[in-house]
Image (cartoon, helix red, strand yellow):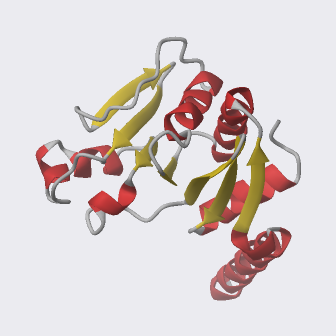
Amino acid sequence: MVEEVLSRTMQEKVMQEKAIQNKVNNNQINLLIDDEDAMVQLGSALAEAMGGEAVIYLQGDLGAGKTTLCRGILRHFGHQGAVKSPTYTLVEPYNVDGQLIYHFDLYRLADPEELEFIGGRDYFSEAGLCLIEWPGRGEGALPDADLEVTLDYNLPGRKATIVAGTVRGITMLARMQEGKCQ
């Protein structure tokens, strides 16, 4: 009897995950971003969709808007101070009303093992939100991304491609597409 209930519960969970996956076209969203304000708004929408825990990879050339997107995410959670890219410190921790947010910029990382020296494993093991610029520089030492956001120049604005890498990421994209995030 217990095994039947567990089996049904697992089947229901699989069906729910498949339903979520079907709502998101190819597990990605493509958006055109007109300006800095729109990038901040996208960050806010992402923050609303992700709740408080996620690993987000941020890809794009220098100046593409990765840190601006982070600013939108942080503002959504209530951060009022400046948001700068932690290029030299590698990570900038934020605690906004109990919400842990870690903003990584791995541009200057010479070797993925350097993440161990700054306590990377600790950051990724805590319940929190990890925003990681230049994740390719930490390949092999980073957890899988729930979402990967790629920003490309599309003058005068940007093109944002958001790809889900986990079931949690697929759920976030579905929330965004359903309009549950403004």
| Vertical relation: 23 (above or below) 42 | below
Q: Residue furthest top?
A: 81
Viewer-nearest residue: 171 or 162:
162
**What x and y, as percent, mark residue 177?**
84, 55
Res. 52 in view: yes
* Residue at position x 30%, y 47% in the image: 107
**What x and y, as percent, mark residue 170?**
68, 65
Q: Residue furthest front?
A: 155
* Residue at position x 58%, y 36% in the image: 69
| Vertical relation: 181 (above or below) 71 | below
**What x and y, as percent, mark residue 66?**
52, 41
* Residue at position x 56%, y 39% in the image: 65
Viewer-nearest residue: 126 or 21:
21
Q: Quadrant of residue 44?
A: top right
Q: Quadrant of residue 142?
A: bottom left
Viewer-nearest residue: 155 or 72:
155
